[in-house]
Image (cartoon, grey):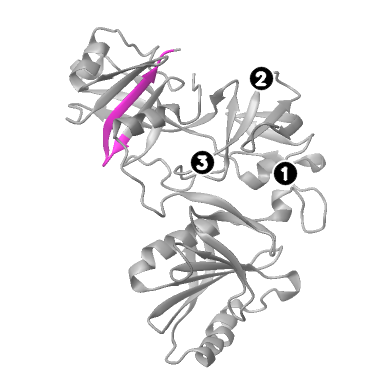
């Protein structure tokens, strides 16, 4: 059973098999009260709200005030763009030219950012690059601004991609449409579903997965074994915190009606969920850094984190020289090398019935399987 979120991941970390995350590799949820939206930003970023003409909005400084930074501004309904291309190519360009000398412009075109198609232009001035994007939305158009120098371009555009992908208006998070009526499922009830994983989420280069290990007898017959890989279901923080009785929650393919939901009085990072159909103990648990899902929630059922199937992977032998197997039994952790791990499989001390995704985790590093952790019941 997946007794605690991150238990096996923590053990793999202790083994030294996960590379240290880059400073901007972890993301946390952030809410803009002034403009009424939520998104995800780099962990440790400084957030302010600016009212400077042409640069209105929530400003996110990655390190400390200065570059790089991104700005997000949700325009009011009465301020919707009539012609976004004209605004970027003429109105906003002229604004920058009046403010900065020697402003260069790459005209507006369609940009693919955060899984969406936006209208965007690029401006250059004072050794700085500015990317200005417009997302046309029914509840108020959104302007995204990235300000950076050439050396910080990758960091800035990555943060912009994450911010666009995870942008959510408060009205939608609360399950209400623009006309004030409940949105979501029939009868005005909201259906909360796990977030659709971003493209490339199944990181077979440096990812960690729960795993079913199968074809174990093929280690000698074919020089391989198979792994079915799973990841934890992840739910948007704003949507979890807006749940109310009568709404529905989807997990591991089934739907449940919310009977009650409340914050645990002893913990700020935990919501207790009762459902009408099942007596299971459900809990939404806030995800902490350095997880890439930090700021959102995992769902636990009777102490086990819920998961979804990702993909199948064939593990070819020989295993890397640095491979380690951790066998966890209560407080006892036995570390084995690759040869000893394969011996446990050959002698059927560990079988396919043991190596299931509720008890087993697998870690990739640089495209190789470098660690497997297995816990006893």
In the rendering, which numbered label is found on residue 242? Answer: 1
How far across and down, in percent of the image, does residue 162 sit? 49, 56
| Dot 3 or dot 1, earlier in sequence | 1
Residue 264 lies in quadrant: top right
Cα distance in 3D space between marks 2 and 3: 24 Å
How far across and down, in percent of the image, does residue 77 sit? 74, 70
- Above or below: residue 242 compared with residue 144: above
How far across and down, in percent of the image, does residue 145 sit? 52, 71
- Spot the residue most to the front: 266
Would you say residue 371 sits in the magenta stretch?
yes
| Crowding at mark 2 (Cα within 10 Å: few <14, some 14-19, many 20+) | few
Cα distance in 3D space between marks 1 and 2: 21 Å
Q: Which residue, given by chain and number where applicable, does mark 3 sit on?
A: 288
The range drawn in magenta is 364-376
Residue placed most toward the observer, 239 or 257: 239
Image-based side of 37 in relation to 340, left or right: right
Pointer 3 and pointer 1: residues touching (CB < 8 Å)? Answer: no
How far across and down, in percent of the image, does residue 32 sit? 65, 60
Cα distance in 3D space between marks 3 and 1: 20 Å
Q: Is mark 2 on a helix, strand or loop?
A: loop
Residue placed most toward the observer, 89 or 42: 42
- Above or below: residue 24 compared with residue 276: below
| Crowding at mark 1 (Cα within 10 Å: few <14, some 14-19, many 20+) | some
Q: Which residue, given by chain and number where applicable, does mark 2 sit on?
A: 280
| Dot 2 or dot 3, earlier in sequence | 2
- Above or below: residue 172 compared with residue 209: below
């Amino acid at each position: 059973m997946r007794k605690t979120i991150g238990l096996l991941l923590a053990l793999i970390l202790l083994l030294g098999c996960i590379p240290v995350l880059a400073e901007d590799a972890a993301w946390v949820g952030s809410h803009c009260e002034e403009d009424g939206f939520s998104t995800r930003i780099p962990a440790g970023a400084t957030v302010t709200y600016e009212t400077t003409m042409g640069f209105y909005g929530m400003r996110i400084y990655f390190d400390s005030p200065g570059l790089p930074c991104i700005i997000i501004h949700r325009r009011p309904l009465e301020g919707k763009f009539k012609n976004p291309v004209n605004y970027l190519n003429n109105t906003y360009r002229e604004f920058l030219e009046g403010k900065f000398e020697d402003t260069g412009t790459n005209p507006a075109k369609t940009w693919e950012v955060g899984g969406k198609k936006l209208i965007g232009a690029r401006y250059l001035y004072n050794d700085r690059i500015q990317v200005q994007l417009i997302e046309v939305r029914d509840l108020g158009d959104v302007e995204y601004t990235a300000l950076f120098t050439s050396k910080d371009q990758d960091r800035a555009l990555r943060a912009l991609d994450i911010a666009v992908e995870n942008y959510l208006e408060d009205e939608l998070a609360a399950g209400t449409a623009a006309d004030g009526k409940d949105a979501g499922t029939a009868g005005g009830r909201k259906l909360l579903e796990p977030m659709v994983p971003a493209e490339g989420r199944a990181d077979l280069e440096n990812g960690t997965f729960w795993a079913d290990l199968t074809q174990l007898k093929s280690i000698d017959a074919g020089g391989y074994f198979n792994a079915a890989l799973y990841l934890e279901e992840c739910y948007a923080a704003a949507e979890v915190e807006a749940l109310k009785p009568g709404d529905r929650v989807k997990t591991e393919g089934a739907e449940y009606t919310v009977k009650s939901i409340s914050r645990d009085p002893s913990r700020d990072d935990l919501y207790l969920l009762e459902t009408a159909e099942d007596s299971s103990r459900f809990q939404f648990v806030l995800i902490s850094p350095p997880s890439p899902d930090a700021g959102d929630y995992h769902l636990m059922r009777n102490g086990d984190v819920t998961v979804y199937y990702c993909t199948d992977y064939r593990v070819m032998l020989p295993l890397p020289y640095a491979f380690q197997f951790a066998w966890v039994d209560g407080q006892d952790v036995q570390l084995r090398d690759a040869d000893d791990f394969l011996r446990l499989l050959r002698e059927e001390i560990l079988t396919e019935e043991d190596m299931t995704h509720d008890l087993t985790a697998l870690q990739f590093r640089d495209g190789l399987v470098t660690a497997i952790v297995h816990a006893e019941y």
